[in-house]
Image (cartoon, rainbow, N blue to C red):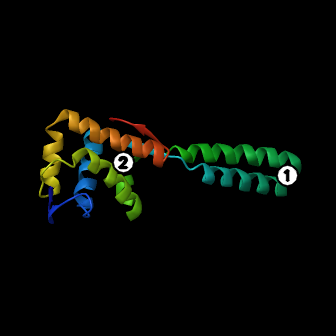
Amino acid sequence: MIRTGTGFGDAGVPLRVDDVMALLSHVATVKGMKAAVANSGRGAMLTGASAFVGGMLGGPPGIAVGGALGGLLGWMTSGQFKSVPQILMELPAAEKQKLCAEAMAVVKNLDWTDAAQLIALVMSNSALTEKVLGVLTTYLTHELKAQLTYGE
């Protein structure tokens, strides 16, 4: 049995997604995690549009110049890092559920009543903290194709 803010339940009962998301955000904040999510589609679109405009204005040499400038702009805007807690807040509900299910595998044996207690339990156990961090890191790198940095 797992005790949550909504009572006791088992793995089939929906658990407190907000508590787990608060835990993941806290761990990310403590570790100073930032992520750049790949936006290759936007960069390709920018490069193509720039090459098109360059071609319309300058012919074949304009295509080369426009493509180069568009590629540079696409590269410059693609590596913008955001804080991981901000990325977690912006996740769609289905993705939050998926991430929480993965994190629950780590914290399923804990007995907590709210997010603050869950955070305290996990942060007081370094092995558990590292496992939660591992879940978060794996999710960000595999599912979101993010590039991570730690600390300031």
Q: Residue at x 19, y 33 (%)?
A: 126
Q: Looking at the rendering, which quadrant does residue 28 occupy?
A: top left
For the image shown, how many numbered marks are present on the structure?
2
Q: Residue at x 32, y 54 (%)?
A: 101
Residue 110: x percent and y percent? 15, 48
In the rendered image, which quarter contains the N terminus?
Answer: bottom left
Residue corresponding to mark 2? 84
62 vs 38, nearest the viewer? 38
Residue 128: x percent and y percent? 22, 38
Q: CA distance from mark 2 to mark 1?
A: 43 Å
Q: Is residue 7 left or right of residue 151?
A: left
Kind of residue at disc 1: Gly
Q: Is residue 48 left or right of residue 94?
A: right
Q: Residue at x 38, y 56 (%)?
A: 98
Kind of residue at disc 2: Val
- The answer to whether one can see residue 56 in this image is yes
In the rendered image, which quarter contains the C terminus?
Answer: top left
What element does badge 2 sit on? helix
Residue 10: x percent and y percent? 21, 59
Res. 58 mark: 1
Q: Residue at x 75, y 48 (%)?
A: 66
Res. 6 mark: none
Residue 51: x percent and y percent? 77, 51
Crowd rating for badge 2 (residues with CA inside 10 Å; few <14, some 14–19, many 20+): many
The answer to which of marks 2 and 1 sits earlier in the sequence is: 1
Q: Is residue 79 left or right of residue 149?
A: right
Crowd rating for badge 1 (residues with CA inside 10 Å; few <14, some 14–19, many 20+): some
- The answer to whether one can see residue 33 in this image is no
